Amino acid sequence: METSLLVGFIGVALVAYLVPGPDWLIVLKGATAGPRRGAVTGLGSQTGLLVHGLLATMGVSALIAAAPGALIVIQVLGALYLLYLAITGLMGGTDEGSAAPVGWREGFITNITNPKVIVFFVAIAPQFVGSGQPIWLQMFILTLLDVIIGILWWTLLACALSPLVTRIGIGRINVVASVLLTVVALGLLAVTAAEHL
């Protein structure tokens, strides 16, 4: 692959990770149980991203993106899952011992049901594919690169958040993350309704 294309993709991927979204919130919730749990939650998210990347490499994501009904279902399921996580988090309240942490599974489901990741691999990643090698090979390389960047990012973020979580309190962080997850979930449902009704 051309170096300029790889550098450009890395830049776009880094910007995507810097913008807070559902993955940020789920890793934040994971970090309430310590940096290791936050990193494991991020690893779950990256496993979901790997699945999306492999599907895009095989062309399946393009087919899903071409079927508006499939994207709607994925978006609604993703929003409902975030809402479920938010409600279970809020039910724990601010009691330090009752805040149920999330982990690999929650990170994976949050990412695999995020239609924005499908759009990323269908509409953005192909822009960094050159003509020198087979497209599938270049998409596979971009996928692995994205997964590695994400693993490093979520691990660093979880480690950086751990002292903050300790200072503020696990229960309070859990409630804040749950409220933010609720806002994101309701926002996704509202956007889906506005776009398709």
Image: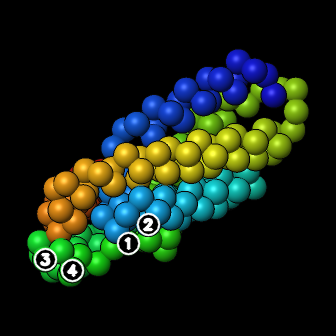
In the picture of the structure, the residue carrying the numbered disc 1 is 102
Q: Nearer the viewer, mark 3 or mark 1?
A: 3
Quadrant, the N terminus? top right
**Residue 111 visible to an observer of this rendering:** no
Distance of mark 1 from mark 2, alpha carbons? 8 Å
* Structural crowding at the residue carrying mark 1, measured as other residues with C-alpha within 10 Å and reported as few (<14), some (14–19) or many (≥20): many
Q: Do callouts 3 and 4 mark residues in contact (Cβ within 8 Å)?
A: yes
Mark pair 3, 4: CA separation: 6 Å
Residue pointed to by mark 3: 95
Residue 6 lies, with reference to residue 177, above or below; the image says above
Badge 3 marks a residue whose secondary structure is loop
Quadrant for residue 137, please give it.
Answer: top right
| Of pointers 3 and 1, the one earlier in the residue sequence | 3
Q: Residue at x 70, y 23 (%)?
A: 5
Instruction: Tell me the kind of residue under disc 2.
Output: Arg
Sequence-first tag of 3 and 2? 2
Which residue is nearer to you in this view: 58 or 31? 31
Please report whichever mark, 1 or 2, sits nearer to the chain's N-terminal start. Answer: 2
Mark 3 to mark 1 CA distance (whole Å): 16 Å
Q: Position of residue 46 (x, y in %)?
A: 56, 56
Badge 1 vs badge 2, beta-carbon distance below 8 Å: yes
Residue 18: quadrant of the picture:
top left
Q: Amino acid at mark 1?
A: Val
Q: Secondary structure at mark 2?
A: helix
Q: Amino acid at mark 4?
A: Gly
Which quarter of the picture shows residue 33? bottom left
Tag 4–tag 1 contact (CB < 8 Å)? no
Left or right of residue 69, residue 176 in this image: left
Whole-Å distance between the Cαs marked 4 and 2?
16 Å
**Residue on which disc 4 sits:** 97
